[in-house]
Image (cartoon, helix red, strand yellow):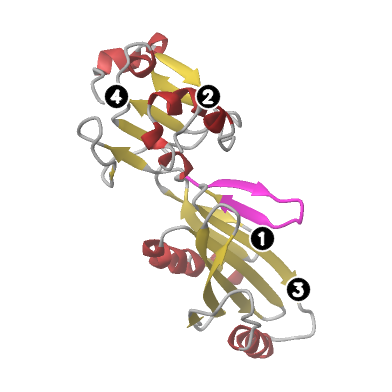
Amino acid sequence: MSNTKDNFDNFHPIGGLPVSKMVVDHNNKPGFMYREKRTRPEDSGWRIFTGLETEEYTDDPDNTGIYSPSTILEIDPSIKEILFKGIGSVYERTEDGANWLKVTDFEMEDDYMVTHRLTEKWVIEINNLFERRIEDSGDLLYTTGDKSVRIAIWNEDDKEKDALYAEHKELSANRDETLAKTLELFDFSDNEVARTGYLVREADEEKTYSVIYGYSIVDYQVLQIAIYFDEISDTDWAIDTWKNIKLNILTTN
């Protein structure tokens, strides 16, 4: 079944697309696109070009328009799956009809590590490309779209670290696997923080993705983290992100 305008009109609402007018007005298909951190809620973060623009051309704001995804998908349906990629994604192709290739050496202005204080006790080191918000549940969420980190913290006033660690290690090892099989168990404990957790694959109506559920534990407190990522190749990133939740040295010294 071929794509129709109605199909594209029902495309997932991701926000507006700033697109070079060489695509829309001059009938050139996109050849280079990247997704940066949004400047406002209605902005998708995507920046789309033909790859033929000069620096002088792109510096002129009159040469860029804001379009709906359906408008650009009518011009080039090949970008449909790419539009679901997260903040920090960069893709290019050498000619019309060629495969899109992921670019890894393109520098974005907001692409650097930052340290955020979660509580008086905890900090996280995470890339500045992640957008941060508090969910209705009270959980803290960092997300780029294709990678997300959800954090919840609670107190256990009557339990010290060793007891909490044993309890949550048992929960991880003997969890109900009816909905998702445990693929790997983790233990990244050190002298200050006990860390235990597991990896699973889950799915929703749109896609299948990996999740690491982890517990970072100190005396009388548990920090639970859920790290979601679409690409298996991002497993090391997920583990490093978990390890980058640490005690705030300003309150522990």
- Which quadrant holds residue 157? bottom right
* Residue 150: image tag: none
Q: Is 140 situated above or below 94?
A: below
Q: Position of residue 209 (x, y in %)?
A: 50, 61
Relative height, residue 181 to residue 128 (above, below): below
Residue displayed at 76% across by 51% down: 136
The Cα atoms of the two marked residues, 2 and 3, are separated by 46 Å
Q: Residue at x 56, y 53 (%)?
A: 116
- Of labels 2 and 1, the one closer to you: 2
Question: Callout 1: helix, strand or loop?
Answer: loop
- Cα distance between the residues tagged 1 and 3: 12 Å
Which label sits in the foreground, 1 or 3?
3
Callouts 4 and 2 close, C-beta under 8 Å: no
Give the residue number, with chain letter if any, for mark 2.
68
10 Å neighbourhood of mark 3: few (<14), some, or many (≥20)? few
Q: Which residue is mark 4?
A: 50
Disc number for residue 155: 3
Residue at left offset 39%, top offset 43%: 89
- Number of callouts in the render? 4
Q: Dot 2 lies on which element?
A: loop
Pair 4/1: label in front: 4
Q: Please state which of the two labelled residues, at mark 2 or mark 3, is closer to the viewer.
A: 2
Q: Which mark is residue 119?
A: 1
Mark 4 or mark 3: whose residue is earlier in sequence = 4
Q: Based on the displayed image, in which of its 4 quarters is residue 232 positioned? A: bottom left
Q: Magenta part of the protein: which range?
A: 129-142
User: What whole-number distance in Å separates the C-alpha atoms at marks 2 and 1?
Assistant: 39 Å
